Structure formats: C-alpha cells, structure tokens
Image (tube, rainbow, N blue to C red):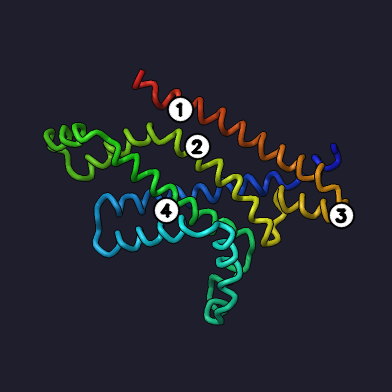
Amino acid sequence: MQDYLMTLLGGLAITLQLTAFSLLLGVLMAAGMTWVLERRIPVVTQLVQLWVLVFTGTPLLIQIFLIYYGPGQFEWLKAGPLWPLLKQPWFCAVLALGFNTAAYSTRLFKGALDAIPAGEVEACRALGFSAGQTLWMKTRHAARRLVPAYSNEVILVLKGSSLASTITIMDIMGLAQRLNAQTYDTLVVFTVAGGLYLTMNGLLTIGFRWCEKRALAFQS
C-alpha cells in the first residue's frame, strides 16, 4: 500500500494545478458575467444566461470531451495560432473545468448579490452613491456571505479534476488507473486514491470554516 501511495502522490501536483488554474479562470469569468447580469446589458446578458444554462445543464465529462476532441474536427482551428494550446490535454482540462465552475460560480455570485437587503441598497442611493459604488458595496457584503457556498464549489472542482484522467492526464486518478491496469489490485489502489482526495477535501473544509468564521464575525 505504501508503494501505491508514493506512486499516486506523483500526481498530486498536477491535481492541485488543475484545480487552482481552473478556479482562477472560473472566478475571473464569473466576476465578469455577474457584472453583466447586474448591469443588465442587452444581448450580452442573454448570452451569459445561455452560457450558464449550457454549462450547468450538461455533464462535465461531456464538456471535457467536446473541448479536447472537438477542435481537432475543424481544419481552420488546426491551422490557427491556438492549435498548439488546444491540442494539449492539460490546457483543455483547465478550460473545461474553468468554464464549468464559471457557470456555477456566476449563479452563486448573483445569488449572493441578490440576497443583500434592499435597505442597504436604498441607503447607498440616498447617500448619492453611483451605480458602480453601489455595486462595489454589494460585492463587499456579498463576498462575506459567499464563503460557505463557494467552499462547496471549490471541493466540487477538486473532485471533478479527476475526470481529466479520461484525456490522458496523469493526475492522481490517471496514475491510479494506470497502476490498477498493471497490478489488478483494484480495491487497494482506488481506496488509496480516494483517501488522498478525502484528505485534501478535509483540509479545504477546515480552511474554509476558519475563513467563514472570520468573514462572518461581523454578524456575531
């Protein structure tokens, strides 16, 4: 079992990289899309709503396959400047995970903003705040309340990163599948792999609970 653990730890860095870069991409995209929804920009708002609908309404595995295998079906993409990136499994996995979490995070961010009491918004208007200043105030207050919900999204992205193994990425799950094919010791191999994911999720949960206590201290 110790040998299995050491082998699987070889994929830990890739798992964490996939998760971190996907979350970064997702947060940046979600922030932009939430801003569009708040400002209710014509046409763009409908496009954002369609994006959220598509990426929250279809399985992540299908999204990974479409983003990885799809571009290769178009000669103009293969001849374009982005092809060196689009043919890389790691890049496609980050795109798929990032696009997926961006859609779910947009829902979370918009919901947190909508939960701001109307009285606070009216107070901003009474004080002569501009629309941008009012949105900034709402964002600051929403961010504090967002921690519990967003912690679940982070954990889901970490677990979802295991699907990247389906496009040849040697993360923890990819190494587990290869190790299982070599040893046929299925129960032990995947138990160890599951233990690694469980440990990481546990550490994330502890960290977010600490952040939650600090973020919501103003309510106590």
- Give the foreground label among 4 and 3: 3
Q: Do the residues labelled 4 and 3 touch (CB within 8 Å)?
A: no
Q: In this view, does 130 lie to the left or right of 101?
A: left
Find numbered disc 3 in the image and state the secondary structure of the residue it sits on.
Answer: helix
Q: Are marks 1 and 4 in contact (CB under 8 Å)?
A: no
Tell me which numbered mark, 2 or 1, is placed earlier along the sequence.
Answer: 2
Q: Quadrant of residue 44?
A: bottom left
Image coordinates of residue 1 in percent, x first then y, are 85, 38
**What residue sits right under mark 1 in the picture?**
212
Q: How crowded is mark 4: few (under 14 residues within 10 Å), some or many (20 or more)?
A: some
Q: Residues within 10 Å of mark 3 (few under 14, many from 20)?
A: few
**What residue sits right under mark 2 in the picture?**
151
- Give the foreground label among 2 and 4: 2
Tell me which numbered mark, 1 or 4, is placed earlier along the sequence.
Answer: 4
Image coordinates of residue 46 in percent, x first then y, are 31, 62
Q: Do the residues labelled 2 and 3 touch (CB within 8 Å)?
A: no
For the residue pair 81 and 177, the one nearer the viewer reads as 177
Find numbered disc 4 in the image and state the secondary structure of the residue it sits on.
Answer: helix
Q: Do the residues labelled 2 and 1 touch (CB within 8 Å)?
A: yes
Q: In which quarter of the image is residue 63?
A: bottom right
Q: Is residue 208 left or right of residue 49?
A: right
Label of residue 147 in the image = none
**What residue sits right under mark 4 in the picture?**
29
Q: Residue extending furthest bottom?
A: 75
Q: Do the residues labelled 1 and 3 touch (CB within 8 Å)?
A: no
Q: Residues within 10 Å of mark 2 (few under 14, many from 20)?
A: some
Tell me which numbered mark, 4 or 3, is placed earlier along the sequence.
Answer: 4
Give the position of the C terminus as an image quadrant. Answer: top left
Q: How far apart are marks 2 and 3 (CA)?
A: 36 Å
Label of residue 182 in the image = 3
For the residue pair 197 and 33, the one nearer the viewer reads as 197
